[in-house]
Amino acid sequence: MSDAVTRRETCRVCESGELYSFLDLGEMPPANDFVEDPDAEQERYPLEVVVCEDCDHVQLRHTIDPEILFGNYHYFSSASAPLFEHFGTYADAVTDRYLDGREDPFVVEFGSNDGVLLSQFDESVATLGVEPAENVAEAARERGVETLVDFFGESVAETVREEYGAVDAILANNVVGHVDDLGDLMRGIDALLGPEGAFVVEVPYLVDTVSNNQFDQVYHEHLSYFSVRSFGRLADRFDMEVRDVERQSVHGGTIRVHIQRASADGDPSRMVHDLESLELALGLDGREAYDEFAHRVERTRAGITKLFELLKTDDVSIVGYGATAKGNVLLNYCDIGPETLDYILDTTPAKQGTYSPGKKVPVREPDVFYENPPEYAVLLAWNYRDAILRNEAEREFRQGGGQFVLPIPAVDIV
């Protein structure tokens, strides 16, 4: 095995439980490793999903060196209009709940990407981003968001605390699942968070991932797949508590988890108890539910492969819609490449002109799609389905009879 890969034998959350393997997607390159040269060789790494038999935390067996995954990143939050809107309401909610009435309020976000969330706080709120990818951090600075280039943990938190003081809210959006050493992360939260402050986290919700067959959420960056119960177990280790949980529709189903010190004012909301009960009712504390999920994934691959065999002919054009990380997982797992897809359209300039990881499908700008619309577009960005269908309703592709192929949660033509 490559020196860049570490195999885990104990749980990231409880650090003691044995790991049960239930889903293996094979070996593939990192899902955001777009390349300039279609003939370039790419390292492939195992993608195996396990569950802790002690605390029921779902996670990847193998960890890839984070410098490989995040050193030069191609994902920019600002490229997604629905996500931009989501972060606007998110900033307002954090302000109303944790910042109003505070003297000199201060917010830190780690994994802050290109600063879209922090840029939407009022000027009276001091903000700091912590982002490991230099190219993305530079985009945040251009947006006016002060950004430190580093991986967040105890050492970085102590440095920030010494220079800036305690924090009223620490935010992390679709990034906690990327962290291998959750103990170091939580020690950082403990070092930086004020007595009544809150650690507010958004992550894809395990219930949605399993219930809606979202296997393409599984990629090397996503080391953990959280439930409310596993967050509770993690917080408890550091004398903290899950105080509230909100379900969100973004990214196909996420949870916004509010964590505070156990000594802070307040008690857990009813929603915390309700979602913990839901997880148990769905059997997420045993092997059977995960084994059934793996069987559905295998059936989905067979269905996708069969559909493309039927659709693809010499005079039919099929393209991908959205050069997403999840889409790249699907293409590699289902063995779909340029023999099936003519190209993938994407609005992110950094991706245009590159080739998708592993399968090497060319990524093109949207103008190509509209100038010569294909017969079919595979909705790789299915998590934005409603917004995409709404935006495309009156445009050339749909008006000319083009149809979307929906791969998740079940294979369908829209």
Image (cartoon, rainbow, N blue to C red):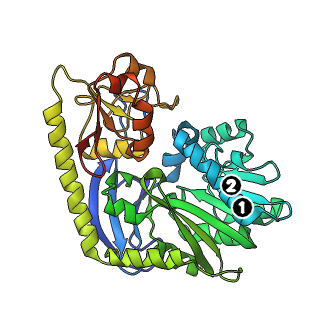
Q: Is residue 20 visible?
A: yes
On the image, the x and y values in percent for residue 399 come to: 34, 24
Q: Give the image quarter of residue 356.
A: top left
Q: Name the side, left or right, on which 156 lies relative to 391.
A: right
Q: Residue at x 17, y 39 (%)?
A: 307
Q: Give the image quarter of residue 330.
A: top left
Q: Name the side, left or right, on which 51 lies relative to 131.
A: left
Q: Which of 310/73 is in front?
A: 310
| Quadrant placement of the N terminus | bottom left
Q: Residue at x 15, y 25 (%)?
A: 313
The amino acid type, in three-letter code, at marker 1 is Asp
- The residue wearing badge 2 is 92
Q: Is residue 157 visible?
A: no
SS for dot 2: helix
The amino acid type, in three-letter code, at marker 2 is Asp
Q: Residue at x 54, y 69 (%)?
A: 245
On the image, the x and y values in percent for residue 154 come to: 66, 66
Q: Name the side, left or right, on which 248 lies relative to 170.
A: left
Q: Are marks 1 and 2 in contact (CB under 8 Å)?
A: yes
| Quadrant placement of the C terminus | top left
The label on residue 96 is: 1
Q: Which residue occupies the extreme top position in the image?
A: 371
Up/down of 256 relative to 272, above or below: above
Structural crowding at the residue carrying mark 1, measured as other residues with C-alpha within 10 Å and reported as few (<14), some (14–19) or many (≥20):
few
Report, in whole angstroms, how far the alpha carbon at label 1 lies from the one at label 2: 6 Å
Q: Name the side, left or right, on which 26 lies relative to 136.
A: left
SS for dot 1: helix
Up/down of 142 relative to 251, above or below: above
